[in-house]
Amino acid sequence: MNKVKIGIIGVGNMGSNHCVNILEGKAPEVELRAVADIRETRRTWAKENLPDTVTIFEDGDELIKSGLCDAVFIVTPHYDHPGLVIKALEHGLHALCEKPAGVYTKQVREMNRAAAKSDRIFAIMFNQRTNHLYRKMHELVQGGTLGAIKRVNWIITDWYRTQAYYNSGDWRATWSGEGGGVLLNQCPHNLDLLQWICGMPSTVMAKCHNGKWHEIEVEDDVTAYLEYPNGATGVFVTSTADAPGTNRFEITLEKGKLVCEDDGLTLYMLDTNEREHCHTAAEGFKKPEGRYVELETDGANPQHMGVLNAFAARILHGTPLVAEGAEGINGLTLSNAMHLSSWLGKAVQIPFDEELFLEELDKRRKASGLKKEVKEVTFNTEGSYGSK
Amino acid sequence: MNKVKIGIIGVGNMGSNHCVNILEGKAPEVELRAVADIRETRRTWAKENLPDTVTIFEDGDELIKSGLCDAVFIVTPHYDHPGLVIKALEHGLHALCEKPAGVYTKQVREMNRAAAKSDRIFAIMFNQRTNHLYRKMHELVQGGTLGAIKRVNWIITDWYRTQAYYNSGDWRATWSGEGGGVLLNQCPHNLDLLQWICGMPSTVMAKCHNGKWHEIEVEDDVTAYLEYPNGATGVFVTSTADAPGTNRFEITLEKGKLVCEDDGLTLYMLDTNEREHCHTAAEGFKKPEGRYVELETDGANPQHMGVLNAFAARILHGTPLVAEGAEGINGLTLSNAMHLSSWLGKAVQIPFDEELFLEELDKRRKASGLKKEVKEVTFNTEGSYGSK
C-alpha cells in the first residue's frame, strides 16, 4: 500500500480546506477518496470543486461503510466526533479526529475504550503540537532541566470572531450544537498544549461569561484559575472579542522562566534553583543570578498537514503520531472542569463528577435556543486557527 | 517660610533612606529637623549618621508634640499609620504617610474622617504614580479616548524576597505586625495604580497562599480575579518568590490595547471601536484595523523625592500633590477584599463588610506566632521597591 485512502467527513470551513490541501499534494502519502456532508450546500461545493475520483456521501455512516477508504478524517461538529470515531474503528478504519475529542468527557471515555480495544490507528488533530516553539516548551518543561513548575499564565485572547462568524451556521455557539463556546471551538488547542507542556492541574476555578460580547448563548470570555498537584498555580484567560488580542504563555519554574509570545520563545535561566537560593541567601532582596539563554529549535511548524502526514506515516510505516487520539480527553477535561466550575460557582477538583457535568450540560441543551439570524457562510479560515 | 521642617517617624529600611536623600539635597524645600524610632538600634544609627541639627526621639508622639516640625513623614510599620496621621493632624502638623494607608479600611476611614475635618495637608507615598509610564496610562485610560476597559491583566511577580528578608524584623510578615504579606508590604503601589488607572472593581475573588515559598504566616503568593462595574474583568497575580519575575500590565479597551512591561509602554490603537466592528463586519475572522502608536511621555520618574517635593510644594505654594492621602483607602480596599475573599473561599463584593474583615483579621492576629529565627537587619533598599 503506497497511500492511505482517506475519507473526510464534514466539509465545512475546515474540512474543505483539508480537501484542497490534500489535492494540492501537501499530504503525499494520502489519497482523498471520499467526502461526506449532511448539508446539501456543502455537497454541492464538493461536486464543483473536487475531482470525480472523490465520491460524495450524504453522511459519515455511508462513507464508513462504503469500503472505499482505509481511514477517515472526522471534521464534523464536535458532538459527533466520538460516535463517528467508534463507528470507523468498528468497521476497521483508522481514524483521525478533529479537536475537541468530543463535548463531554463521559462520551470521550467511551471512544477511548473503543480505541483501546481496536488495532486501528486513532489520532487527534492537535496541529499546534507541531509548532517548534511549543515542542521546545514541552521538551524543556517535561525534560525537567528547569525544575518544578511554580506558575503558569496563558493569556490567549487573539481568537477574534465577529458576530457574522457566529451567525454563519445554526450549530455554532449553541449548547445543543457545539456544547460550548470559545472553550470548545477555539481553545481545544491551547488546553491541550497547556496539559501537554505543564501537566494536568488538580483544581480549576473558572468564570465563563456567556454571550458577553456576541449574541450567543455560550461563553465568549473565560478566566480560569488552576492549581497543580505540586502546588503550582496558573491562570488561563481567553476571549473571542479582544482586538488585537494577546497570545502570551509564561511558565515560571524553579530554575527559570519561559515566555512564548508573538512567535518568539525566550528562556531566562537561573544559575541556582530559586528554592535553594531563597533559603540560603544572606541578602534580603537579591534574586538568584541568571541570564537569557539562546534557544535553538528546528523552526518547523507543519500544522494540520503535519498531523495528517504523521497519521498516514503511522499507518504505513509505524512511526509516531503527533498526538495519540486517547490524549484528547485531557484538554476536554480542562474545558469541562472550567464550565462546571462556572456553572456551580465554585472550585472543581479533577477528576470531577462526569455525571453531574452531563446533567448540567443537558439542562442547557434543552433550553438551547436556535439562533434567529443565521446566514450560512463558509469562511476562508486561513490564518484564523492560530497557525503560529 | 522657605522650607518645610519635617520629622521622620520610623527610620528602618525606608525611613533611613529618606533621611539620606533629604540630607543630600534631593528635597530642596524640605529641612530634616527630627527623627523618631522606638528601636534603640535605629536611634543609634541616627546618632551616628545624621547631623546634630536633627533631634532624635524615642517615639512618634514625642516628635509630634515637640513643636520642632511643620510636618511629619510616617514610615513606621503599617498598623501605626492611621493613629500617627490622626495625631499629627490634631497637633496642626501636615502629614505624609508611607503606603499602605493602614492595615484595614475601617481604621483608614477614621483617618480620612480626621483629615477631612483638618485644614492641614495629608498626602500618601504612592511614589510609583510619579512614573511617566503609569502617568501616561492613567491619562489615556481615564481620558476616555480608548473607550471603555474590557480586560486588565497585571502580572507583578518581580517583588523578590529571600527568607533572610523575612527574618530581618520580628514584625515582618506576621498578622500582628504587618497584617498581611505581599499585598500589604509590596503591592500597595500596584493596587493603587490599578485603581488609579482602571478604577475600582465591584467584585474580587482571590486565592492567597500563606507561607507558600517562605517560612512566614502570611501570603507570599496571590492570584485575584476582578470584575468591574461595566462588566470588564481582570487578573492580578503577585508573588515574592518568582525569579526573575514579571511586571507586565496589560489593559484591553474598546479602541486599543496598552501593555506596560520592562520599562516600556506600547499602545496598539484600533481605527474603529471593536464593539461596533464586531456587530457590523461581514467577515467572520477579521479584526478591526489598527496599528502601534508612538507614545510620548515626559520621561520623568522622580519617585519618593517627587512625592516629598510635591508635598512640600503643596504646603508652601498650594500646588497639587502626587496622591491625596484620602485616596490611600482605595488600594487597601482591594487588598482587604482579596484577603477576605480568600479567607471566606468566595467572591467578595465591594464595598464589603468591614466589621467582618476586622473580625477575621483579629482571629489571625490572636493566633499570630512570633517568628523563631529573627535577625534584625537593615537592608539597602535601593532598587527593591519597583522604582522603575
Image (tube, coloured by chain):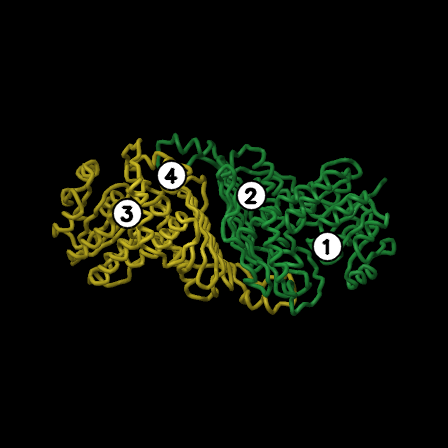
Chain colours: A yellow, B green
The residue tagged 4 is A161
Q: Residue at x 39, y 38 (%)?
A: A211
Q: Which residue is situated farthest in the right direction here? A: B52
The amino acid type, in three-letter code, at marker 3 is: His
Say whether disc 3 or disc 4 marks the residue closer to the N-terminus.
3
- Disc 3 element: helix
Nearer to us of marks 4 and 1 is: 1
Say whether disc 1 or disc 2 marks the residue closer to the N-terminus.
1
Q: Position of residue A53 (x, y in %)?
A: 14, 45
Chain for numbered disc 1 = B
The amino acid type, in three-letter code, at marker 1 is: Thr
CA distance for labels 4 and 1: 52 Å
The amino acid type, in three-letter code, at marker 4 is: Arg
Nearer to us of marks 2 and 4 is: 2
Q: Position of residue A21 (x, y in %)?
A: 26, 46
The residue tagged 3 is A78
Q: Position of residue B155 (x, y in %)?
A: 53, 51
CA distance for labels 3 and 4: 19 Å
The residue tagged 2 is B350
What label sits on residue B76 in the rendered view?
A: 1
The amino acid type, in three-letter code, at marker 2 is: Ile
Front in this rendered view, residue A221 or A378 = A221
Q: Is residue A260 above or below residue B290?
A: below
Alpha-carbon neighbours of circle 4 within 10 Å: few (<14), some, or many (≥20)?
many
Looking at the rendered structure, whether the residues under marks 2 and 3 are on a common chain is answered as no
Alpha-carbon neighbours of circle 3 within 10 Å: few (<14), some, or many (≥20)?
many
